[in-house]
Image: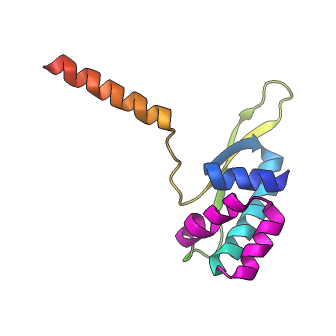
Amino acid sequence: MLANMVCSLITENRITTTLAKAKAARSVAEKMVTLAKSGTLHDRRLCVARLHQIDAVKRLFGEIAPIFKDRRGGYTRIMHLNQRRGDAAQLAILEWVELPVAVSETAKVEDKKVVEVKEGDKK
């Protein structure tokens, strides 16, 4: 479960989960970034053995680790949310500290449509 959560964090840059799971996934994610910062073949194999998803490891080594190369730790942050309605579990967002959160493609398309409509109204 933790490996899948860390892979989701690597691919999506942000995940929403319970506070306990976020705290557990945070330690695994930070250890993977520490391994990825060195970039050796052995460290890459250790990450693949732990995460089981080659695409996530490629993104970790290629995009995420170079951003954190000067940082000594604290690669993730946990932001507390409200409680879940069904079982009152405390929710939290786990995300990277220095990475911008990617905007979904649908939001980009909607923004372009709004701009086109506004420009059409002006003419």
Give me the residue at 53% from left, 48% from top.
101
Is residue 42 inside the magenta stretch? Answer: yes
Give me the residue at 50% from left, 53% from top.
100
Instruction: Pinpoint residue 26: horizontal percent, then vertical percent.
Output: 75, 58
> Going by the image, does 79 lie left or right of 19?
left
Quadrant of residue 25 within the rendered picture: bottom right
The answer to whether residue 31 is above or below residue 85 is: below
Give me the residue at 74% from left, 55% from top.
6
Instruction: Pinpoint residue 12: horizontal percent, then vertical percent.
Output: 62, 48
In-front residue for pair 108/84: 108
Q: Which segment did they paint magenta?
A: 39-68
Quadrant of residue 33 within the rendered picture: bottom right
Instruction: Pinpoint residue 76: horizontal percent, then vertical percent.
Output: 65, 59
- Of the 4 image quadrants, the one containing the C terminus is top left
Q: Looking at this rendering, what residue extends furthest in the front direction? A: 54
Q: Looking at this rendering, what residue extends furthest in the top direction? A: 121
Quadrant of residue 73 within the rendered picture: bottom right
The answer to whether residue 42 is above or below residue 114 is: below
In-front residue for pair 17/57: 57
Instruction: Pinpoint residue 117: horizontal percent, then vertical percent.
Output: 27, 21
